[in-house]
Amino acid sequence: MKAIEITRPGAPEVLQLCERPLPVLKEGEVLIKVHAAGINRPDVLQRLGHYPVPPGASDLPGLEVAGEIVDGNLDGTGFAKGQFVCALVQGGGYAEYCAAPVRQCLPVPKGLNAVEAASLPETFFTVWSNVFDRARLSGNETLLVQGGTSGIGVTAIQLAAAMGHRVFATAGNEEKRLACEQLGAARGIDYRAEDFVEVIKAETGGKGVDVVLDMVAGEYVNREINCLADDGCIVIIALLGGAKADIDLAQVLRRRLTITGSTLRPRPIEFKAAIANKLVSNVWPLIEAGKIKPVIHSIFPLEQAAQAHTLMESSTHVGKIVLSLE
């Protein structure tokens, strides 16, 4: 099969087309003929040498795919050979064929094509796990999304808004700020022109937000504490602003705040399977009803994975970047 491999840690040019043998299936896995694969920030980190591959996972990049099941033991799984699915994988998505744990496969929501379906797993698994399971956003609570036009951001805005929550989101310019509002944010915030702490305080009558989804960390954490409501939660999923922060622990104690975080890739299949079930029950109906829509910024052929990574690193995109193999 054709695949994209990381020839050495480095710039996008280290992504090269190669020939690889088809994956050898492990127990509980299916073989997917890939029609499209999503590009995600962890792929960039892996290419740079900053995101080690979990033991037993493919060294090929790519954490989400959509395509046709062509092999594997499907007895009792609810899936059939020839069925189109999307799947969260530990690696190997940038290839013509990819092995996926069958319990991490999801039916393609009705009405979506392969590119749209491939844009779903990584961000929806991540957002559900962190915003709804870990931070427990519920009821009339409010959410602040840092980086509202990223793949994670557009998912978090749409999903939280569709479930009835008031959402705020930061972005790097006026065009992106407005894009956040078009996706469902009650207020987009241009972090270069506005202080998000002041905006949140003004928009919430001084209360602050209940949950912050943070992809920045670093010096943002203490500012997020300042715009968090009592009993609120900051959930950190990336460290684009750095891994260290100087924070006001007195506020954490006095106001019963929670600062937490997680990464998805090393978690066991059982953990991800539980999220998959929640997505099919709670989120897929919203997608099929048109209340949540995949946001695709750009589509590249497999052999142009390097150009796709260059775009990802530019941070000029709104939504997902996807490789198409059709």
Image: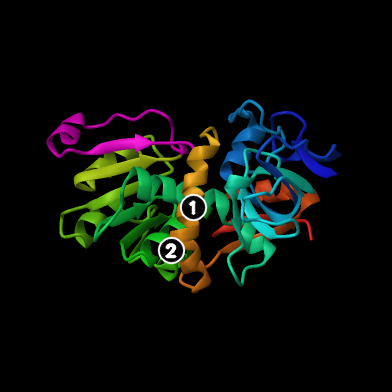
Whether residue 123 is situated above or below residue 9 in the rendered picture: below
Residue reaching furthest to the left: 254
Disc 2 designates what residue?
158
The residue drawn where x is 28% and y is 55% is: 138
Q: Is residue 264 visible?
A: no
> Dot 1: within a 10 Å radius of its alpha carbon, few (fewer than 14), some, or many (20 or more) residues?
some
The residue drawn where x is 31% and y is 48% is: 136
Q: Give x and y (percent) for residue 279.
A: 48, 56
Viewer-side label of 2, 1: 1
Q: Is residue 11 visible?
A: yes
Disc 1 designates what residue?
277
Tell me the SS state at disc 2: helix
Q: Is residue 209 left or right of residue 132?
A: left
Tell me the SS state at disc 1: helix
Q: Give x and y (percent) for residue 242.
A: 44, 32
Q: CA distance from mark 2 to mark 1?
A: 19 Å
Whether residue 104 is situated above or below residue 200 in the rendered picture: above
Q: Which residues are magenta?
A: 238-263
- Give the quarter of the image for residue 85: bottom right
Quarter of the image with the C terminus is: bottom right
Closer to the N terminus: mark 2 or mark 1?
2
Label 2–label 1 contact, CB within 8 A: no
Amino acid type, label 1:
Asn
Please count the marks in the image.
2
Residue reaching furthest to the top: 55
Q: Is residue 200 left or right of residue 55?
A: left
Q: Is residue 181 magenta?
A: no
Amino acid type, label 2:
Gln
Q: Is residue 258 magenta?
A: yes
**Most foreground residue, 113 or 237:** 113
Residue 104 - label: none
The residue drawn where x is 67% and y is 49% is: 75
